[in-house]
Image (tube, grey):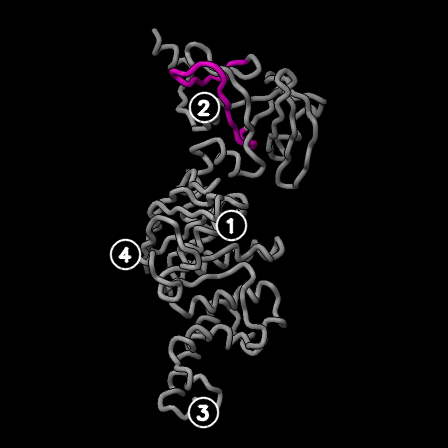
Amino acid sequence: MAGIILDRIEKSFGATRVLGGVSLSFASGEFVSLVGPSGCGKTTLLRIIAGLETADRGQVSIGGADVTGRRAADRDVAMVFQNYALYPHMTVEQNIALPLVMRRLGAFERAPLVGRLVPGTDQRRQAILAEVREAARLLSIGHLMQRRPGQLSGGQRQRVALGRAIVRHPKAFLMDEPLSNLDAALRHDMRKELVELHRRVGVTTVYVTHDQAEAMTMSDRVAVMLGGKVLQFGTPREVYERPATIDVAGFIGSPRINILPAEADARGALSFAGRRTGVAVPGITGEVRIGIRPEHVGLQADGMACDIRHVEFLGAEVLVYLREPQTGTELIARLSPEAWAAQDRGRTAGLALPAARLLAFGADGGRLALSAEHQAVQALV
């Protein structure tokens, strides 16, 4: 197993800067996701790790060795592509075996008939076949070995692509949105299978996706990228509960976090729509944006009056779309069916914003430290 270190990676295509000095370190055996919107640079970064693109500046290290100048074939990494890249004329067995055949057999030995005349060829082919069968067993595709890609479902083709990567015993797996071509139900199943496979194989894995659900459910750590930079790198829980910037807060989470306009008074105490929030940003006055996740928004009779715009019943949860009339701010509350049933179901609802669940962001988008309002008052006395 091997860790990966990226040191100040820069990349431009013409006048367009794609990566602006990215530095990351992935531990040996870690599953890391690069997540962000299209065009944020995540696939380019993955291709630089693989050696399929060359960085303008910076260094790539894999397993403690500087591989910046090495070609892709010499980096000992396996890449799984979005389109699977299987050879349609080959069987599943032949597709999985291909990397080992190319590595262990010479051009003459690979010849269908005369190759078997070379001493030791049969033994090497049997060793390759044993490794292929073991990979197929891990992926539960042993019964598909004699089929061709055109005879397989999308999920089966994805397993074959993974098998071809596994048999190489690489230092790292690099995966570029490998589940994006699958339907929602199969994508969910394959997420679980990939996590289980990673636990069994234990190889460092870098996974590129624009789907935050994949990144949050599969990864040990997540790197959130935007505009060619890493905005935050941490565990899924850290990124969700303690976003470093308002952009991270807005990208991670579904439904999106509620962002509300607030005002900080001379003591830093925050108010929304003329009501105190119970928290303060010491040393800051003026406009501040506060955030709260939909699942933390409460509805209660004595809360701030809001109009109910729309309600979505989703079985295990209810999404209530609200509008605060004074500021015109739109909010979403995520409630349990029981909590929604307890409401009087009028056209308005009382909004409650628990102080302990609030986040605050400054003019530069960075997250601000919050304290209880009474502590801010005491600090000025």
Q: Earlier in the sequence, mark 2 or mark 3?
A: 3
- In the visual, does 190 lie left or right of 243? right
What's the residue type where badge 2 is placed?
Gly
- Mark 1: which secondary structure? strand
- Quarter of the figure with the C terminus: top left
Look at 43% across and 28% down and name the residue there. Answer: 367
Give the percent coordinates (x, y) of residue 151. 63, 72
Which amino acid type is shown beneath numbered disc 3?
Val
**Left or right relative to 294: residue 97:** left
x, y (%) of residue 244?
A: 42, 33
Q: Quadrant of residue 319?
A: top right
Is residue 306 highlighted in magenta? no
The kind of residue on which mark 4 rests is Gly
> Residue 145, how many percent across, how many down?
54, 76
Residue receiving disc 3: 114
Give the quadrant of residue 337. top right
Q: Which residue is mark 4?
A: 64
The tag earlier along the polypeptide, 3 or 1, is 3
Q: Nearer the viewer, residue 89 or 165?
A: 89
Residue occupied by mark 1:
209
126 shown above or below 183: below
The boundaries of the magenta stretch are 275-296
Q: Which residue is mark 2?
A: 362
